[in-house]
């Protein structure tokens, strides 16, 4: 029985990050739509935040579809892999719309673009919650701990970390975005899987780059 380290912890942390960031982005869209559109002072940070949502969500789905589900498909026979992969595709159809919306938001954004963003985010959110509820029933810390010995667990965690880090670009936005969309108690747990010195990068040389997103991160972040 192996509970620590456990790859389910990283998956669940990523669910928390995405859940919170979708809530924050939808709330900001609605607030902006009910005033005159995007506020100039927070526009850059908001666009960075939206781009990070797309990167983190896409990476998480690719990790599950390409690595997690194929590995656990036979080990957890009830895991509804086809249904979950289909939902990744449905969320992906909404994420593709960001490619047209974001360039418009970067210029002189139209209210219609903000409405499209709100619709895409809401569409993702509607699929997201029941989707992760199912994943978290089948991929629990206990189940995975019982299935893998420690060496296998460490090997898998390392391969997931490598897969994700290669896709977290730009790192100076995507990594702080994840770190500070977690409450303080979970940050340390999530950061255990990061390369050494990453926390130092977040608080030092990357800080000027991610700081425009601070309005959307946990309020203890300065
Ligand atoms: Fe998923
Ligand atoms: Fe997931």
Image (cartoon, grey):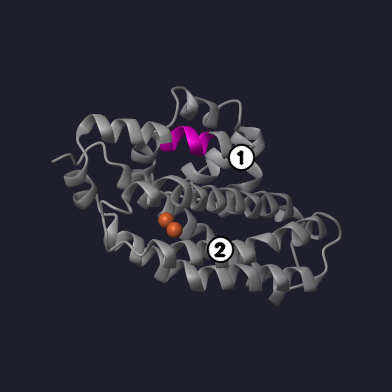
Q: Quadrant of residue 184?
A: top left
Would residue 195 be visible to someone looking at this image? yes
What residue would you read off at disc 2?
Answer: 89
Query: How far across and how far down the image is residue 164, in percent?
Result: 50, 39
123 in relation to 174, above or below: below
Q: Which residues are magenta?
A: 160-165
Taking the magenta stretch, the answer to whether it contains residue 161 is yes
Taking the magenta stretch, the answer to whether it contains residue 96 is no
Q: Quadrant of residue 119?
A: bottom right
What residue would you read off at disc 1?
Answer: 173
Query: Of marks 1 and 2, which one's residue comes earlier in the chain?
Result: 2
Query: How far across and how far down the image is residue 137, in percent?
Result: 28, 63
* In the image: residue 214, left or right of residue 162: right
Query: How far across and how far down the image is residue 196, in percent?
Result: 44, 22
User: Which residue is the extreme one toward the front?
Assistant: 74
Q: Nearer the viewer, residue 118 or 144?
A: 144
Q: Residues within 10 Å of mark 1 (few under 14, many from 20)?
A: many
| Label 2 secondary element | helix
Q: How many marks?
A: 2
User: Which residue is the extreme one toward the left?
Assistant: 1
Q: Residues within 10 Å of mark 2 (few under 14, many from 20)?
A: few
């Amino acid at each position: 029985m192996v509970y620590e380290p456990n790859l389910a912890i990283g998956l669940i942390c990523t669910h928390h990050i995405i859940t919170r960031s979708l809530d924050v982005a939808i709330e900001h869209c609605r607030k902006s739509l009910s005033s005159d559109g995007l506020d100039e002072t927070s526009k850059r940070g908001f666009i960075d935040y939206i781009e990070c949502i797309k990167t983190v969500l896409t990476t998480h789905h690719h990790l599950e579809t390409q690595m997690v589900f194929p590995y656990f498909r036979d080990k957890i026979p009830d895991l509804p892999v086809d249904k979950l992969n289909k939902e990744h595709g449905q969320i992906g159809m909404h994420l593709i719309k960001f490619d047209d919306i974001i360039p418009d938001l970067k210029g002189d954004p139209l209210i219609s673009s903000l409405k499209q963003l709100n619709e895409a985010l809401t569409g993702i959110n509607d699929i997201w919650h029941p989707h992760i509820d199912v994943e978290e029933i089948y991929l629990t810390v206990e189940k995975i701990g019982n299935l893998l010995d420690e060496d296998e667990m460490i090997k898998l965690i390392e391969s997931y970390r490598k897969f994700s880090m290669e896709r977290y670009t730009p790192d100076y936005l995507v990594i702080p975005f994840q770190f500070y969309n977690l409450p303080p108690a979970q940050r340390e747990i999530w950061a255990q899987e990061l390369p050494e010195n990453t926390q130092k990068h977040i608080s030092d040389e990357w800080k000027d780059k991610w700081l425009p997103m601070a309005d959307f991160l946990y309020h203890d972040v300065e």
